[in-house]
Amino acid sequence: MPLTDIAKDNQQEKREETDDYTTCGMIIGRFQAGQRPADIARALKKAPSTIADCIKRWKKTGSGIIQPRKGRPLKLSERDERAVVHSIREEPFLPF
């Protein structure tokens, strides 16, 4: 029996967002030319949901590009961070 990489079989495929200019631009261009989303998906070999998301984003924002998300909120405000840095610089060898 041949040895196989078990971890490789259990890994899920990573999903990628269609954020590049060319792919979403081609989708929007074909949509404006009158092609149906199903035909665009077949022609570009993309999932129909990808086509629909790109078109929806274009209708809402006027651009097919994905905007950056906010991410995790900061724990400290700028003022708190300055205070921590200041106190560490005053006495750098204090224990936790």
Image (tube, grey):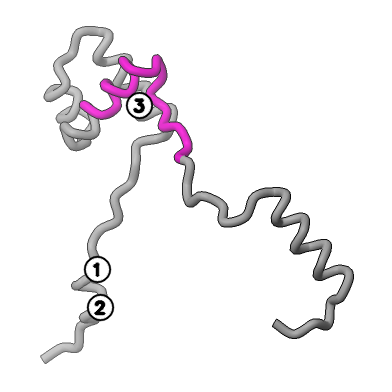
User: Residue 33 location in percent, x, y?
Assistant: 25, 8
Rendering quarter of residue 2: bottom left
User: Residue 8 location in percent, x, y?
Assistant: 25, 73
76 is higher (above) or lower (below) than 53: below
The residue pinned by badge 2 equals 7
77 is higher (above) or lower (below) than 64: below
The residue pinned by badge 1 equals 11
81 is higher (above) or lower (below) than 68: below
Disc 2 marks a residue whose amino acid type is Ala
Nearest the camera: 83 or 39? 83
Indicate yes or no whether the magenta region holds residue 58.
yes
Q: For the residue carrying disc 3, how many other residues have a C-alpha within 10 Å: few (<14), some (14-19), or many (20+)?
A: many
Rendering quarter of residue 4: bottom left
The residue pinned by badge 3 equals 24
Q: For the residue carrying disc 1, how many other residues have a C-alpha within 10 Å: few (<14), some (14-19), or many (20+)?
A: few
Q: Quadrant of the N terminus?
A: bottom left
Nearest the camera: 20 or 94? 94
Cα separation, mark 1 vs mark 3, equals: 28 Å
User: Residue 49 location in percent, x, y?
Assistant: 18, 33
In the image, 52: left or right of 79?
Answer: left
Q: Residue furthest right?
A: 90
Give me the residue at 21% from left, 26% from top. 52
- The span shown in magenta is 52-69
Give me the residue at 83% from left, 62% from top. 86
In the image, 88: left or right of 27?
Answer: right
